[in-house]
């Protein structure tokens, strides 16, 4: 699918829908109590927030950091900030004080909007001398209505459903709307500014890929401080006139009850969450009903063909894997729905209305089938990293393509096959090993729930390959069992020389597995065991 263009802003995105239609559903712990929010209320509340920013001299181009958990307030604070031509910068509410200080300083925040009770965020803001607005969500159980308050300089201001009129100035497509940081797998996180055009282009691409419509209702299980949850699910659903179900946090024990109650048609998540939901199949009260979903989307981490097959068997609907990253305002490629074409397990699909290529080390495009660094072009791509000229030189080719840092190739049908991160490819004595290939071989073992391989320093080969696995419940595995299994699956030099069998892996806040962290974690365990043996 070739590139597409759009000139919408986020204000137009939500304001173009039918005002009386439901935009958001907020569940509570009691299934009898939930709130629905119309598009009219969403727009009004967002404008109210914008007006508060203007009244307190927060102006065009100022960065507003939003440290609020999933729910209705974070959506309003985000949209309201962008409506007034300011820049929204959501952060993970679980960060420590030192982490908050790094991010707030790097983004040059002018205001911090923080959920009441988040002491680390409040402490960091105070130490940096930044003004703070505190957010409190208010749920009326008698009327099943939700709104929230802002505490500003000791004064409590209600963000409610009162009609507040329009905006004095509208945002423009090239205004920066969102400021995020990369996950920092190999260096300090880099700042990524995304414009209204970047975001709405991506929203349009996603909506077209999955035929999203006002009839769709998506469950938000990913955090809204991340592009997957914010752009990939929430804003794409709002663009299409559908509605969002936003629990405070993902809970496998309430997921299926809420899916059935609110007639959810799709959700998107990382493979870790899909695996958790499959594990609920043995609990009758939490087990899925086949055919409930129109489709399920997987993104932000590699989905093994084995897990894809298990998901389709369990849920009885198409599982569609996509490929995205922060710098591209999320989606770049995707497999298609069955009615639109074939899907390929182990592939992240074809270009999603953007241009996708594979480049050599000089930045020149390679022929189909050749392995190189995946690169992309399109109006969803950021213009460049914030205040980081060297990163921009390193990550954009002379022809203007953005280099993703992922190694892969395009097959004869135009499907993108990823081999791994460029800096994570394992070089064992000159043999280049794709970590994803070894991961997938491990996951073919029916007793393994999760698997990850990684490179470690080695005196003889430069790098050696190790792995770690999490067995499925009620399965006992030994390192020798796994070694013998792999001997039938992959060539000997790709078989990990050490395999850890463990109960869990360290993961990021979005459920992603980062090989660098896994490597550090198990190297420490190995070093401790060696020291103890001495």
Image: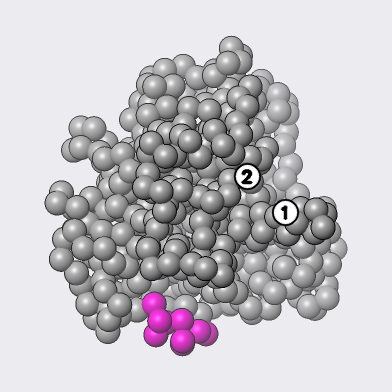
The scheme the figure's colours follow is one colour
Which disc number belongs to residue 250? none
- Is residue 392 highlighted in magenta? yes
Q: Does the image show residue 215?
A: no
Q: Does the image show residue 518?
A: yes
Which of the 4 image quadrants contains residue 479? top right
Q: CA distance from mark 1 to mark 2?
A: 10 Å
Residue 207 at what x, y percent from top left?
32, 46
Residue shown at the point (40%, 81%) measured from the top left: 394
Residue 57 at what x, y percent from top left?
65, 77
Q: Quadrant of the C terminus?
A: bottom right
- Is residue 79 highlighted in magenta? no
Q: Is residue 231 left or right of residue 513?
A: left
Q: Relative to 337, is 194 above or below?
A: below
Q: Relative to 240, is 402 above or below?
A: below
Span shown in magenta? 387-395
Camera-nearest residue between 472 and 393? 472
Q: Secondary structure at mark 2?
A: strand
Camera-nearest residue between 359 and 264? 359
What residue is pinned by disc 2?
Answer: 500
Residue shown at the point (53%, 78%) measured from the top left: 61
Residue 210 at what x, y percent from top left?
31, 41
The answer to the question of whether label 1 and label 2 lie on touching residues, with beta carbons closer than 8 A, is yes
Residue 449 at what x, y percent from top left?
54, 33
Residue shown at the point (57%, 67%) measured from the top left: 457
Which disc number belongs to residue 525? 1
């Amino acid at each position: 699918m070739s590139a597409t263009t759009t000139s919408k802003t986020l204000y137009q995105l939500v304001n173009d829908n039918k005002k009386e239609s439901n935009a958001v559903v907020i569940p509570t712990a009691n299934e009898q109590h939930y709130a629905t929010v119309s598009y009219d209320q969403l727009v009004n509340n967002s404008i109210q927030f914008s007006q508060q920013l203007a009244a307190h001299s927060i102006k065009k181009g100022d960065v507003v950091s939003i440290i609020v958990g999933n729910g209705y307030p974070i959506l309003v604070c985000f949209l309201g900030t962008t409506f007034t031509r300011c820049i929204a910068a959501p952060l993970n509410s679980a960060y420590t004080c030192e982490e908050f200080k790094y991010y707030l300083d790097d983004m040059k925040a002018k205001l911090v909007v923080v959920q009441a009770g988040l002491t680390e965020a409040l402490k960091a803001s105070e130490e940096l001398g930044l003004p703070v607005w505190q957010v409190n969500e208010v749920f009326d159980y008698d009327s099943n209505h939700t709104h929230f308050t802002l505490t500003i300089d000791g004064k409590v201001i209600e963000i409610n459903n009162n009609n507040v009129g329009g905006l004095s100035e509208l945002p423009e497509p090239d205004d920066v709307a969102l400021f995020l940081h990369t996950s920092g797998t190999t260096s300090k996180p880099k700042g990524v500014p995304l414009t209204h055009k970047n975001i709405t282009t991506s929203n349009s691409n996603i909506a077209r890929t999955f035929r999203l419509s006002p009839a769709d209702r998506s469950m938000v299980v990913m955090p809204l401080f991340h592009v997957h949850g914010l752009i990939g699910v929430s804003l794409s659903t709002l663009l299409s006139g559908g509605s969002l179900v936003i629990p405070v946090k993902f809970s496998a024990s309430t997921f299926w009850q809420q899916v059935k109650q609110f007639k959810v048609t799709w959700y998107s998540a990382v493979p870790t969450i899909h695996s958790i939901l499959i594990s609920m199949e043995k609990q009758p009260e939490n087990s899925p009903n086949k055919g409930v979903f129109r489709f399920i989307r997987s993104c932000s981490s590699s989905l093994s063909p084995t897990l894809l097959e298990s998901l389709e068997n369990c849920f009885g609907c198409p599982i569609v894997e996509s490929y995205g990253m922060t710098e591209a305002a999320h989606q770049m490629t995707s497999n298609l729905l069955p009615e639109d074409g074939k899907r390929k397990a182990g592939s992240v699909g074809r270009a999603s209305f953007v241009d996708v290529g594979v480049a050599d080390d000089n930045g020149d495009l390679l022929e189909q089938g050749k392995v190189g660094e995946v690169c992309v072009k399109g109006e969803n791509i950021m213009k460049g990293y914030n205040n980081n000229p060297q990163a921009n030189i390193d990550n954009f080719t002379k022809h203007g393509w953005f280099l993703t840092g992922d190694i892969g190739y395009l097959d004869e049908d135009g499907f993108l096959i990823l081999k791994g991160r460029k800096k994570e490819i394992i070089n064992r004595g000159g043999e280049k090993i794709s970590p994803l290939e070894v991961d997938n071989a491990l996951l073919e073992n029916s007793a393994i729930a999760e698997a990850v391989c990684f490179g470690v320093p080695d005196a003889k080969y430069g790098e050696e390959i190790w792995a770690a696995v999490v067995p499925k419940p009620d399965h006992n595995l030994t390192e020798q069992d796994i070694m013998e299994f792999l001997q039938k699956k992959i060539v000997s030099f790709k078989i990990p020389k050490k395999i850890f069998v463990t109960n869990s892996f360290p993961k990021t806040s979005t459920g992603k597995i980062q090989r660098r962290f896994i490597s550090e974690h198990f190297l420490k365990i190995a070093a401790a065991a060696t020291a103890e043996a001495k």
